[in-house]
Amino acid sequence: MHFEIRSDIPAYLSELKIWLNEVRGIELEAMDDFFTARVDEYEDHMALLENAGFQEVAAIDCINGATLIKAVRR
């Protein structure tokens, strides 16, 4: 099985560098503030995914405040 995330990695990296320069001055939200601000919404968010037909949802990475979701359809 062939799995390809990006077809043109040099172009992607070039665009990523541009974006990083654009957002460089934006202050990051503290991790505890990030989760505290969203704790009341978590159950509703997960229910939306479940109602959309996903049986398994796992947070894989939340190192920098961005969460990567693995979801498996029923």
Image (cartoon, grey):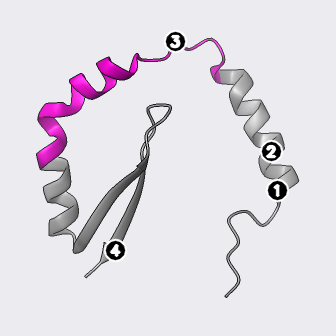
The CA span between labels 2 and 1 is 6 Å
Residue at x 25% of width, y 82% of height: 74
Pair 4/1: label in front: 4
> Is the residue marked by circle 1 packed among few (<14), some (14-19), or many (20+) residues within 10 Å?
few
Magenta span: chief secondary structure: helix
> Is the residue marked by circle 2 packed among few (<14), some (14-19), or many (20+) residues within 10 Å?
few
The CA span between labels 1 and 3 is 28 Å
Of labels 3 and 4, earlier in sequence is 3
The CA span between labels 3 and 4 is 34 Å
Q: Secondary structure at mark 2?
A: helix
Question: What residue does disc 1 label?
Answer: 9
**Amino acid type indicated by mark 3:** Glu
**Amino acid type indicated by mark 4:** Val
User: In the picture provided, is 64 more to the left or to the right than 20?
Assistant: left
Question: What residue does disc 3 label?
Answer: 27
Question: What residue does disc 4 label?
Answer: 72
| Numbered range of the magenta stretch | 23-43
The CA span between labels 4 and 1 is 27 Å
Question: What residue does disc 2 label?
Answer: 13
Q: Is residue 58 above or below residue 64?
A: below
